[in-house]
Amino acid sequence: LSPQTVYDLVRSSATRLLRGGVSRILIPPNELSSQWTTPAGEVLTELDDELPRRAQASGHACTNSRHEALRVTSHHGARDDGSRLCVPLLVRQQVIAILEVTH
């Protein structure tokens, strides 16, 4: 399977499992890129990165509460009020990506 196929399957499975509206995998800034990207190489220029950065720093899942719902941008570019869940994906106890689900 190609990386894009695996990415699409993981994204659709996570959305169904978590009953979220949109899910995506975020690759944190690193020595190769100063911006958040997707595994497919898409640069996320309009990402509100406060929650993913909290998840990355803590190594634990983070969410905004119903009372703190953020204005978020879906992968279609539309802005909407919603709650978000960001879960760090770890390899050898290092955060390599963040799973973001928007409800």
Image: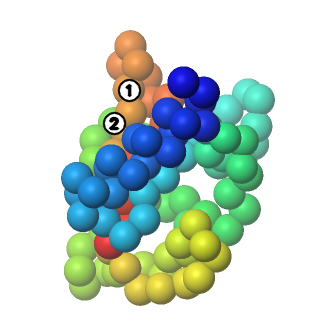
**Disc 1: CA contacts within 10 A as few (<14), some (14-19) or many (>=20):** some
Residues at marks 1 and 2 touching, judged by CB atoms closer than 8 Å: yes
**Disc 2: CA contacts within 10 A as few (<14), some (14-19) or many (>=20):** some
Q: Residue at x 60, y 27 (%)?
A: 2
Q: Is residue 9 visible?
A: yes
Give the x, y percent position of residue 49: 54, 59
Q: Quadrant of residue 59?
A: top left
Labels 1, 2: front one: 1
* 30 vs 89, nearest the viewer: 89
Is 18 on the left or on the right of 11, as rendered?
left
| Circle 1 residue | 90
Identify the disc placed on residue 59: 2
Q: Residue at x 64, y 76 (%)?
A: 77
- Circle nearer the N terminus (1, 2): 2
Residue type for callout 2: Gly
Q: Is residue 81 above or below residue 100?
A: below
How many numbered callouts?
2
Is 88 on the left or on the right of 77, as rendered?
left
Give the x, y percent position of residue 84: 35, 66
Is 74 on the left or on the right of 12, as rendered?
right
